[in-house]
Amino acid sequence: MLRLLEIEFIKLWNSRVSKFLIIAYFFLLTSIALIAAIKFDIGPIKFHLAKEGIFNFPYIWHFNTFVAAFFKLFLAIVIVSMMANEYSNKTIKQNLIDGLSKREFVLSKFLTVVGFSAISTVFIFVVSLILGLIYSDFNEISIILSDLEFLFAFFIKLIGFFSFCLFLGMLVKRSAFALGFLILWQFIEGMIYLVLRWKFDENFASNVLTFLPLNAMSNLIKEPFTRLGAVKSVAQQIGEDISYDFGVQWYEILIVLVWTALFVYWSYLILKKRDL
């Protein structure tokens, strides 16, 4: 397995575009720290974002994983390009001639997905830990280590999303079309929700949407902003109740894992039946 993973990373690192996107992705993950520098000082209005509690433990695990998930498109481009290049450069055919089975080929791509997801998760853990130790008002070990399930959810979310990209890259064979289909699918899920809401009701539509791939991945880490004390205080003043359950649910993890397994299996079926 390590040999397969090493082969894939060598391929990616030898591609200038992939190398640039990978470096840009991790740079953007690091740029989360720049949020701490955001300050407003306009007359009586003085506002320092870092002092509003966004880097407090354990909230920081929720906030940073939610924000970092927006940057995953950079690696999505790398993954669909990785598949497109295999077809355009005919390296997939050469790999199979050299003795790599189709099962091993798909496994090597999935291991790359897992590798990127694991490295991203560790990276966010380190960045968040450093920011938390600098800015958090709570530094007790028990508090620091709570809510770490958001890191696990982030890991599963990336694996699911990148597996979807892998499947699209295998299906379409062109990176631009694969990314276009990814955007189209998000639109399709939105249309399904609107149709079901119109035909039935909002509750039924929301329940169905929970099982669709992109929304299932999105549900793993819910928006963290209404957890902030300042937001809750404003909501209470205007009579709004924003007491939501922000936790990571086991069934949401299971749904994404099922989709991940399906995407990998479908990728293998496509390769198995396709005439190369």
Image (cartoon, rainbow, N blue to C red):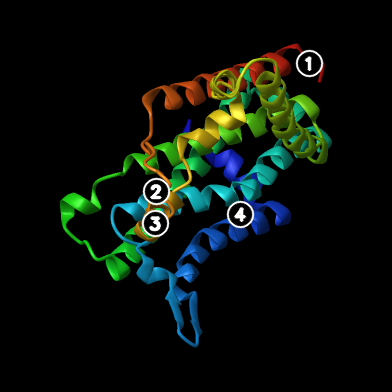
Work out whether residue 196 or residue 268 is closer to the camera in this orientation and state it.
196
Query: How far apart are the alpha carbons under marks 3 and 4?
Result: 45 Å
Closer to the chain start, of discs 3 and 2, is 2
Q: Distance between the residues labelled 4 and 1?
A: 30 Å
Q: Is 18 situated above or below 127?
A: above
Q: Can residue 98 be seen in this view?
A: no
Is label 3 or label 2 in front? 3
The residue sitting at 72% across, 21% down in the picture is 195
Which numbered disc flags the more N-terminal residue, 4 or 1?
4
Q: Does label 1 or label 3 sit earlier along the sequence?
A: 3
| Earlier sequence position, callout 2 versus callout 1 | 2
Q: Quadrant location of the C terminus?
A: top right
Pick the residue in front: 57 or 71.
57
Q: Do the residues labelled 1 and 3 touch (CB within 8 Å)?
A: no
| Disc 2 residue crowd, few under 14, some 14–19, many 20+, Cα 10 Å | many
- Mark in the foreground, 3 or 4: 3
Q: Nearer the viewer, mark 1 or mark 3?
A: 3
Q: Specify the amino acid type for callout 1.
A: Arg
> Which residue bears the numbered disc 1?
274
Marked residue nearer the N-terminal end (4 or 2): 4
* Residue designated by label 3: 237
For label 4, the SS is: helix
Above or below — where is 49 with respect to 120?
below
**Residue shown at the point (44%, 42%) measured from the top left:** 118
- Amino acid, disc 3: Gln
Q: Name the residue under label 4.
A: 22
